[in-house]
Structure formats: structure tokens, C-alpha cells
Amino acid sequence: MSTPTYTEVQLQALRDALAKGEKRVTFGDKTVEYRTVEELKQAIAEVEAAMHKDAVATGLYPRAPRQIRVTTGKGF
């Protein structure tokens, strides 16, 4: 199953609803009503995570740099 693709507009609509204390969000012709503010916050976190994953996969954001352990002492 593939991860849904989200847009900045959708993310902003979720954030705007949270800021206004609303639980109903409309994206174009689709309306979603969340049961709780916590559920809305979870939706925001899910969208942010999916967008970050997409950005990394497409090269927009670099992957985390590899960790290189440097040791000092004898033998170097």
C-alpha cells in the first residue's frame, strides 16, 4: 500500500482549523470532521510525516547524514 500524497494547502487547512478551534476541515469538495482536537493533531502529525518522507524520497530534503565515529588514541 502506498503512502498518500499530501499538499501544503491541505496541511495548512489542518493547521488553520486547529488554530481556530475547529474540528471540520474542507479540502476542495471533501470535508472531514474530526471527533477531537487530539485526533486533528494526529492528522497534522501524519501529514507532516508523510510530506517529509516524500521530500526525502524525491531528494528535496537530504537523508540524515551518516554518522562517522571518530576515535582518538593509540594506533592512529
Image (tube, helix red, strand yellow):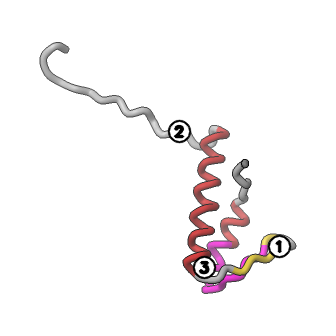
Q: Give the range drawn in magenta.
A: 14-26
Label 2 and label 1: CA atoms lie apart by 33 Å
Q: Which residue is drawn at 26% across and 27% down?
A: 70
- In the image, which disc is placed on residue 18? 3
Kindly identify the amino acid type of the residue bearing the numbered disc 1: Lys
Q: Give the mark, 3 or 2, whose residue is nearer the N terminus.
A: 3
Please say whether residue 30 is one of the residues in the magenta stretch: no
Q: Is mark 1 on a helix, strand or loop?
A: strand
| Residues tagged 3 and 2 counted as in contact (Cβ below 8 A) | no
Q: Mark 2 points at which residue?
A: 63
Identify the residue at the far bottom of this view.
21
User: Where is residue 37 shown, x and y percent of the image?
Assistant: 58, 81
Q: Residue at x 73, y 55 (%)?
A: 4
Kindly identify the amino acid type of the residue bearing the numbered disc 3: Leu
User: Where is residue 71 shown, x and y percent of the image?
Assistant: 22, 26
Note whether 2 is above or below 13 in the view shown.
above
Q: Residue at x 38, y 33 (%)?
A: 67
Label 1 and label 3: CA atoms lie apart by 18 Å
